Amino acid sequence: MKSVCILLVALLCGRVNAQKPDLVISNPKIINVENGSITLNQDILIKGNVIIAISPHKKTYDKSVRIIDAQNMYAIPGLWDMHVHALWSEWFEVCNPLMVAYGITGFRDMWGELKLADTIRKKMAGGEIPFQRFIVAGGLVDGAMPIWP
């Protein structure tokens, strides 16, 4: 039974690694945020919007694969901003591109418009705007004499 499980895992891993990437981020310095180490001479292989492998650097890939030369660049995991106020009307149009540019792939909105959050989720799902994960708290709970309506 143990050998069957090992074979199944090996086959599944081989299948994932056998996928042909659409995009390769070639030879970045990969930062391990757990211990601060930097890994060199690796490529990040991406299919759709999923990293399918990090493998030893290759000089050439199939001509259909888009390659980003990241030799003098760094790669880190996506960042989360845990306190933003981005889900307010036009303000999101300013905040979203800035967060994406600075590597923020998820955020927690402390008080935002829930209807706007639903609209943004639909636009992200449809590919209209860059995808990010986010959590929104909703309206402010302000007490008996509220400052905000």
Image (spheres, rainbow, N blue to C red):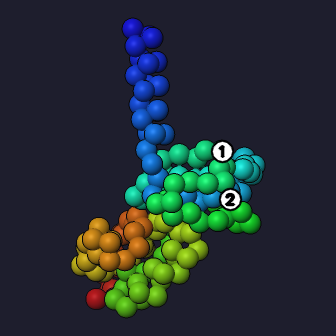
Work out whether residue 111 or residue 37 is closer to the camera in this orientation and state it: 37
> How many C-alpha atoms fall within 10 Å of the one at disc 1: few (<14), some, or many (≥20)?
few
Which element carries disc 1, helix, strand or loop? strand
Q: Position of residue 72 (x, y in %)?
A: 74, 66
**Which residue in the structure is indicated by mark 2?**
28
Q: Where does the C terminus fall, quadrant-wise?
A: bottom left
Residue drawn 37% across the image and 77% down it: 129
Work out whether residue 85 or residue 133 is closer to the camera in this orientation and state it: 133
| Residue 76 shows in this picture | no
**Which residue in the structure is indicated by mark 1?**
56
Q: Which of marks 2 and 1 is in front?
A: 1
Residue drawn 64% across the image and 65% down it: 69
Q: Where is residue 135 in the image (x, y as percent from the top left)?
A: 38, 65
Residue 37 left/right relative to 55: right
> How many C-alpha atoms fall within 10 Å of the one at disc 2: few (<14), some, or many (≥20)?
many
Task: Report how far apart the C-alphas of labels 2 and 1 lie in the structure.
Answer: 11 Å
